Amino acid sequence: MRRTGWIGVVCVALSGCVILGYAGGGFGDAKFVAHRYEKLVREGWPKPFMAFANGANVDAEIALGRTLFYDESLSADGKVSCGSCHTSYTAFAHVDHKLSHGVFDREGRRNAPALMNLAWQSGFMWDGAIQHLELQSMAPIAAHTEMGMTLQDYLSGIKQNPRYQSLFAAAYQNQPISLPLALKAIARFELTFVSDQSRYDSMRRHQVRFTQQENRGYALYQKFCAACHAEPLFTRPEYEYNGWADGLRRVDSLGVGLSGLDRGRALVTGLVADEYHMKIPTLRNVEVSFPYMHNGAFQTLYQVVKSYSGKRLVVRGESGGLSKAGGISKVGGSGELVGSGESGEGYQTVIDISLDANERVDLVVFLLTLTDRKFLYSKDFVDPRQSPRKGD
């Protein structure tokens, strides 16, 4: 049974679920948004799950969202903002701690993920608890270990700040300052986090050629990594288990977990099959988005690659491993096949990963081609109170 999201309860308690005022305008399922913001179109990329219509006030909305994203005053101790855990020059990841730190230096239970190409994502958070970008920011705002605010106090903080009067007026003429509009503006800013100018992208556009080592690494990626981290986004809108809890899990006779480990996607769906499954992170800009994994377990890419060597991964098909057609495939090694193609109970890919020391280096070298320095150092993404970086 799917667990009801806590955010919906908060909305009702706060304002009679004012969020539902957007239900007829694409605020619900992002897959049905009718309009597209032209800057989100990319040749060779899939259609975005979420987009928004062009309009005269788009730049003003983005400017408002950028200000809100970096405003520490809208937190319980006046020191934490979205930008505190999502730094632009590290692909909007948090590299200072294994786990995110919030107000009063409270430690969270997961590593803050990198943020980019969000229009092509259909679920947010490591467990996919939130299904729309305009709702996502409510989670850190209200979380005890992040910004620690009630939504009412957050809104009051905005209304009491004179600069927001003009920012909201420019973005949303004739509309009073409200929480839905604030969340909408933050999402507008986040939708501009598009990364597509890496060396890999230049190679795909036939602007550069890979070195022999980069090509060797690319071939290894295609063999062992692409089933989860699919081109061109280097992710899939799914949740997978990479074996991180092997040897740590314990269950009782009824199959109930006793380890106290993060149950991942199962916390949302309640399904045993989703135990320890996490959102597939993008590999784009992975060079700078350490520490890696939901728990910040690894500090270097080589450590990550080495940890996978010798593993057997069972990758589920689309829609949580359930496919009408059913089926099985195998990638790499000589591992036995799993599942039943005739039963239609799922489509699974078994990947036996085998990488010697030289191959690990080659794979890391390829991963470095996914670094997009134009994205990382764009002055459009930094705190608007900062001066532009040297070289911009």
Image (tube, grey):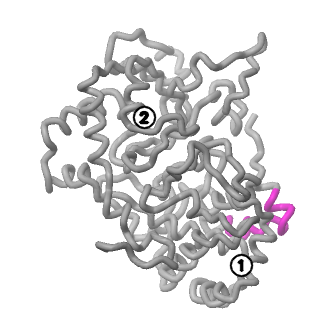
Image quarter hosting the N terminus: top right
Q: Secondary structure at mark 1?
A: helix
Q: Where residue 76 sits in the image (x, y, percent)?
A: 76, 65
Vertical position of residue 170 compared to residue 104: above or below: below
Please give the residue where the numbered disc 2 appears in the rendered image.
228
Q: Is residue 237 visible?
A: yes
Give above or below for 149 relative to 263: below
Asked whether residue 117 is in view, the answer is no
Q: Quadrant of residue 276?
A: top right
Label 1 is placed on what type of residue? Answer: Ile
Q: Secondary structure at mark 2?
A: loop
Can residue 13 be found in the magenta stretch? yes
Q: What range of the chain is rendered magenta?
A: 10-23
Query: CB under 8 Å between callouts 1 and 2?
Result: no
Q: Name which residue lies at 73% across and 27% down.
A: 260
What amino acid is found at the position of numbered circle 2 in the picture?
Cys
Q: Nearer the viewer, residue 351 or 149?
A: 149
Q: Residues within 10 Å of mark 1 (few under 14, many from 20)?
A: many
Camera-side residue of 239 and 289 = 289
**300 versus 330 height, above or below:** below
Tag 2 or tag 1, which sits nearer the N-term? Answer: 1
- Residue 50: x and y, percent? 51, 60
Magenta residue check for 7: no
Few, some or many residues within 10 Å of mark 2 (<14, 14–19, 20+):
many
In the image shown, does 74 or 202 lie closer to the viewer?
74
Mark 1 — residue?
158
Indicate left or right for 374 with 52 as reference: left
Residue positioned most to the right? 13
Q: Give 61 or 115, whichever is nearer the viewer.
A: 115
Q: Name the image quarter holding the C terminus.
A: bottom left
- Quadrant of residue 235 in the image? top left
